[in-house]
């Protein structure tokens, strides 16, 4: 169905994830290291993972394969959640977002803050779905922050593993949770604005214009903007930042960096003086060596081809030397990980 979500009671088996595996786009798969040095970098080494291995029929189109895997994962996750519906929860949390008028009256002295989330929508399996609609086809819009917690945003993208947002991350977005934690204390958390990252310049201009317009209409004082991916979407990030700043609204951008293995290269493909407050998820080009493991779920067939790897990755002792780029969630652009540096 396409009912609106984000209200009522949601049952969540916290600490568990459904992981689908399969060679959809061979050069843009990822690795979850459960026990080696890479385990520190991926949030999914800390979850109980039910892994589903799905092998495609011969000559199946990649987009059909991705769609099938996505639906298998979602149906299995829903089935597992059904099994828990009669259990007594160990803990419960209440999230409440008043409408705009009520919120304005409730906290007139607090700065009005929104979250602008950029969704991967470059196409060719770089896709995200909002209530089932391909994000390439949306104009920027406003959600209640609780809608993303309930699965309004689904990942269908096969981009570099380190900074893509799987559906699990959309549903457990720490930026949303942290803003809720400060709501009514230091800020008035007004809305969750979503926008896309299309590849054509006209689309980028249109979406960033609309995003800035929505922020102005909401009467905001500040915005947190998170990117998904890198390279081409860096342009969308900077457009959103400078146009929202031009409306007199302060921004903080959250991204990651591709600064080369020595950390000395330009981190983003675009820049502007307006982007003077930035949170980095880390340098995806940093090298890490993962030792040989006795058990591999999925396939190692493409390990030398995936983004962040090379034909020299596989070492004589069976270990692999790769960039953080290959590790799922390693440089999460919503901060969904366990490492930080100051």
Image (cartoon, rainbow, N blue to C red):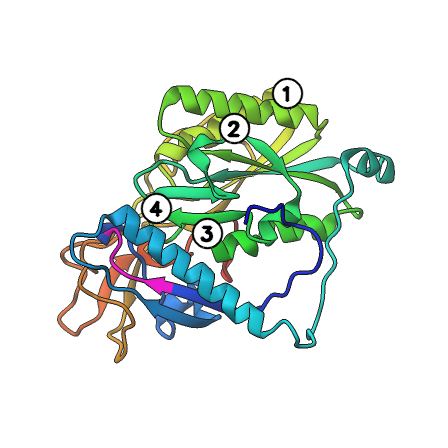
The magenta stretch is 20-25
Q: Position of residue 126 (x, y in %)?
A: 35, 42
Residue at (38% x, 21% y) in the render: 201
Specify the label residue 247 is tagged with.
1
Q: Is residue 20 left or right of residue 168?
A: left
Nearest to viewer (mark 4 / mark 2): 2
Nearer-N-terminus badge (4/3):
4
Position in image of residue 291 (x %, y %): 26, 72
Label located before the other in sequence (3 or 2): 2
Q: Of discs 1 and 4, which sits in the foreground?
A: 1
Is label 4 in a helix, a strand or a loop? loop
Q: Is residue 261 at least partly visible in the picture?
A: no
Q: Residue at x 52, y 64 (%)?
A: 78
Secondary structure category for the residue under label 3: loop
Determine whether the residue tagged by mark 2 lies in a helix, strand or loop. loop
- Counting residues from the start of the chain, the first of labels 1 and 2 encountered is 2
Measured in 3D between alpha carbons, the distance from the residue under mark 1 to the one under mark 3, in whole angstroms, is: 28 Å
Few, some or many C-alpha atoms within 10 Å of disc 1 (few <14, some 14-19, many ≥20)? Answer: some
Residue 194 percent coordinates (x, y): 55, 37
3D distance between C-alphas at marks 4 and 2 = 36 Å
Q: Nearer the viewer, residue 73 or 292?
A: 73
Mark toward the viewer: 3 or 2: 2
Residue ID for mark 4: 263
Number of the label disc, if any, that sits on residue 332: 3
Element type at marker 1?
loop
Q: CA distance from mark 1 to mark 2?
A: 19 Å
Relative to 293, say whether 159 is above or below: above
Q: Mark 2 = which residue? A: 139
Instruction: State the CA–CA distance, disc 4 to disc 3.
Output: 18 Å
Visible residue check, residue 113? yes
């Amino acid at each position: 169905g396409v009912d609106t979500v984000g209200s009522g009671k949601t049952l969540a088996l916290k600490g568990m994830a459904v992981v689908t595996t399969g060679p959809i786009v061979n050069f843009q798969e990822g690795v979850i290291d459960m026990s080696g040095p890479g385990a520190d970098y991926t949030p999914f080494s800390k979850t109980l993972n039910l892994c589903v291995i799905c092998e495609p029929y011969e000559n199946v189109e990649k987009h059909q394969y991705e769609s099938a895997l996505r639906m298998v994962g979602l149906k299995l996750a829903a089935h597992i959640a059904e099994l828990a519906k009669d259990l007594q929860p160990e803990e419960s949390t209440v999230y409440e977002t008043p409408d705009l008028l009520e919120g304005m009256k409730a906290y007139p002295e607090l700065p009005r803050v929104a979250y602008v989330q950029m969704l991967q929508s470059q196409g060719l399996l770089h896709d995200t779905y909002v209530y089932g609609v391909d994000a390439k086809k949306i104009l920027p819009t406003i959600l209640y922050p609780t809608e993303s917690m309930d699965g309004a945003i689904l990942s269908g993208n096969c981009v570099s593993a380190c900074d893509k947002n799987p559906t699990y991350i959309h549903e457990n977005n720490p930026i949303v949770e942290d803003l809720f934690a400060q709501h009514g204390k230091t800020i008035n958390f007004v809305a969750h604005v979503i926008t896309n990252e299309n590849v054509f310049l006209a689309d980028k201009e249109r979406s960033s214009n609309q995003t800035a317009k929505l922020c102005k209409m909401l009467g905001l004082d500040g915005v947190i903007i998170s990117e998904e991916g890198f390279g081409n979407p860096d342009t969308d990030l900077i457009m959103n930042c400078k146009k929202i700043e031009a409306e007199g609204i302060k921004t903080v951008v959250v991204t990651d960096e591709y600064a080369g293995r020595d950390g000395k290269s330009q981190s983003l493909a675009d820049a502007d003086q307006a982007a003077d407050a930035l949170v980095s998820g880390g340098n995806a080009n940093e090298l890490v060596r993962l030792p040989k493991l006795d058990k591999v779920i999925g396939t190692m067939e493409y390990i030398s081809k995936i983004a962040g790897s090379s034909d020299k990755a596989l070492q004589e002792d069976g270990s692999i030397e790769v960039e953080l780029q290959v590790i799922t969630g390693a440089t999460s652009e919503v901060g969904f990980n366990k490492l930080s540096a100051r």
